[in-house]
Structures are given as structure tokens and as C-alpha cells.
């Protein structure tokens, strides 16, 4: 199964996955979070980025909790194990690479974790409020469908599960780093509760490929001030502004 997932992942939406480091056919045009190459200009930079300007199902979005439709969504099942820590600062975020076998199921599809990375402050907003940061756990199904599990980071007690990442966090772009003996218990990176806000959207970086299933976890992960400062020493401001919801609905599991 893991090999099938990765082969279909490459076929599914090569350009979009390349922007996340999951394929080798990335558009060559530079983009950024500010200035003439910033989010309001992404659609002008490259024809491959046209959805960033013209797409109708773009991410991130502002989740208005009063407008969320309460739904009996299938409970997410997360089967994450332990993996060696491998980090890459790619000039837009710090990406943590993982090996095969870490799975997410939404009751309709099984998705394999491909990588995860962070944005600071958060890209999604809840009632127009940003969290301190947001981690995106990017998954792919054998048929090429993508699902992103979003974890919001708020201030509070230290998150011990993230400490190996923070200890090794590269603050400048460069090659992959794999600190000897550093491992991650991936399930400890998620909150205990798996109630979500769910909607259909896009990748949040060029080319902003649509057809991505988003699961924004309602329960945040707490990090200490020191840990948040460490994250923001690498990236602070690598968040795309929220996009119009248009005719989409956000569904919510758990109590309102």
C-alpha cells in the first residue's frame, strides 16, 4: 500500500504536490509571502498558479463557529507510529519528512502521511482570530486525493512531543538535516481530541491546487512561549491570508 500511495500521489496533482516537496516537477517561478511575489500576486507569477487567483475553493478560510453546520462526521482514525526526525528548511517553511506507514482514515478513505510543516501565525482563523501557529499534516490516498490535518498552536504548557523538532529546527534554508538518534512519536504531536471542522479547499501555497479535504482540529496543541518563539525564529509571517468561502460549508463534529 505505501508504494501504491506514493506512485498515485505523483500522478494526481504533480505541480501542487511539488510545492509541498512531494514530487519533482515543481513550477520554477519564485513566490513569497510579501511584495510583488506575495499572495495577492501568486496568480500572476505563473500560469500554473492560476487557481490562486481564480479558484473558487481556496484555502485557508475564516471559520465562523456560529455558521458551522453540526454533522455526524465519521470519527477520524489516526494510526501514527514513531519515525526518525528529518527536517528541511525549504525557504517557505520547515518541512518534516516521514517514512511510509503513518495513516489517517476519515471513514471514506485511508490516507498516508507524506510530510508535515508549519505556518506562523496560523493560516486558518477561528472567528477571525489567528492562533500562534498551525501545523499541516499532509496525507495522500491511493487514488490521489489529498487530506490535510491542521493543528492549531496556542500558548500554554510546553508540548514535549514537539521538542525534538524545536531543538533541531533549521532557521535558514538548506539541505535535509537528520540529527542522530532523534525520533518523533508522531501521535504525540496531535491533541487528544480529534473533533474537527471539515471543508473542501486547496493547498495554501502555489499552485494552490484544489480538491483537498481539510480537517482543522478543534482542540489546539499548547506550546510554551519559548517554544513558540523558537518556531517563529525560523518563520514568522509565512501564512497565506484567508480566502472567500463562497458557496462552501464548514461541517463540525463534536458539541457546538
Image (cartoon, grey):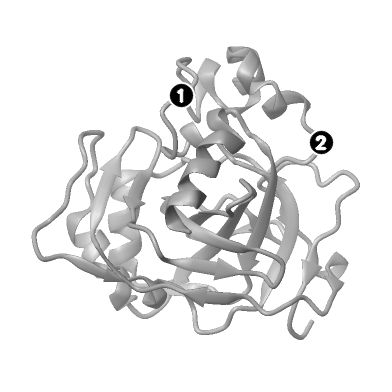
Residue lying at 50% horizontally and 30% vertically, measured from the top left: 33
- Outermost right residue: 247
Count of numbered circles in the view: 2
Quadrant in the rendering for residue 85:
bottom left
The vertical placement of 20 against 64, above or below, is above
- In this rendering, does residue 108 appear at all? yes
Q: Is residue 255 left or right of residue 146?
A: right
- Outermost left residue: 180
> The C terminus appears in which quarter of the rendering?
bottom right
Name the residue carrying label 1: 25
Quadrant in the rendering for residue 129:
bottom right
Q: Is residue 112 left or right of residue 199?
A: left
Residue lying at 43% horizontally and 66% vertically, measured from the top left: 102
Residue lying at 57% horizontally and 83% vertically, measured from the top left: 193
The vertical placement of 240 against 126, above or below, is above
Which element type, helix, strand or loop, lies under badge 2?
Answer: loop
Quadrant in the rendering for residue 24:
top left
Eye-nearest disc, 1 or 2:
1
Q: Position of residue 31 (x, y in %)?
A: 49, 22
Using a 10 Å C-alpha cutoff, classify the residue at mark 1 as few (fewer than 14 neighbours), some (14 to 19) or many (20 or more).
some
Q: CA distance from mark 1 to mark 2?
A: 24 Å
Residue lying at 47% horizontally and 40% vertically, measured from the top left: 238
Name the residue carrying label 2: 56
Amino acid at each position: 500500500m505505501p508504494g501504491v500511495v506514493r506512485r498515485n500521489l505523483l500522478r494526481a496533482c504533480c505541480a501542487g504536490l511539488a510545492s509541498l516537496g512531494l514530487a519533482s516537477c515543481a513550477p520554477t517561478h519564485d513566490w513569497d509571502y510579501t511584495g510583488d511575489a506575495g499572495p495577492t500576486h501568486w496568480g500572476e507569477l505563473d500560469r500554473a498558479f492560476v487557481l490562486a487567483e481564480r479558484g473558487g475553493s481556496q484555502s485557508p478560510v475564516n471559520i465562523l463557529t456560529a455558521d458551522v453546520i453540526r454533522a455526524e462526521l465519521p470519527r477520524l482514525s489516526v494510526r501514527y507510529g514513531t519515525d526518525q526526525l528529518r527536517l528541511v528548511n525549504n525557504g517557505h517553511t520547515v518541512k518534516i519528512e516521514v517514512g511510509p506507514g503513518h495513516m489517517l482514515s476519515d471513514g471514506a478513505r485511508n490516507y498516508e502521511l507524506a510530510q508535515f510543516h508549519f505556518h506562523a501565525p496560523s493560516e486558518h482563523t477561528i472567528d477571525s482570530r489567528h492562533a500562534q501557529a498551525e501545523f499541516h499534516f499532509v496525507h495522500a490516498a491511493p487514488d490521489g486525493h489529498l487530506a490535510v490535518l491542521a493543528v492549531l498552536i496556542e500558548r500554554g504548557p510546553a508540548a514535549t512531543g514537539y521538542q525534538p523538532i524545536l531543538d533541531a529546527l533549521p532557521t535558514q534554508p538548506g539541505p535535509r538535516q537528520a540529527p542522530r538518534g532523534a525520533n518523533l512519536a508522531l501521535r504525540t504531536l496531535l491533541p487528544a481530541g480529534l473533533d474537527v471542522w471539515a471543508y473542501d479547499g486547496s493547498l495554501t501555497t502555489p499552485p494552490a491546487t484544489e480538491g483537498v479535504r481539510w480537517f482543522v482540529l478543534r482542540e489546539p496543541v499548547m506550546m510554551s512561549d519559548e517554544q513558540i518563539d523558537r518556531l517563529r525564529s525560523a518563520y514568522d509571517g509565512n501564512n497565506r491570508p484567508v480566502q472567500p468561502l463562497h458557496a462552501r460549508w464548514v461541517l463540525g463534529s463534536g458539541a457546538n
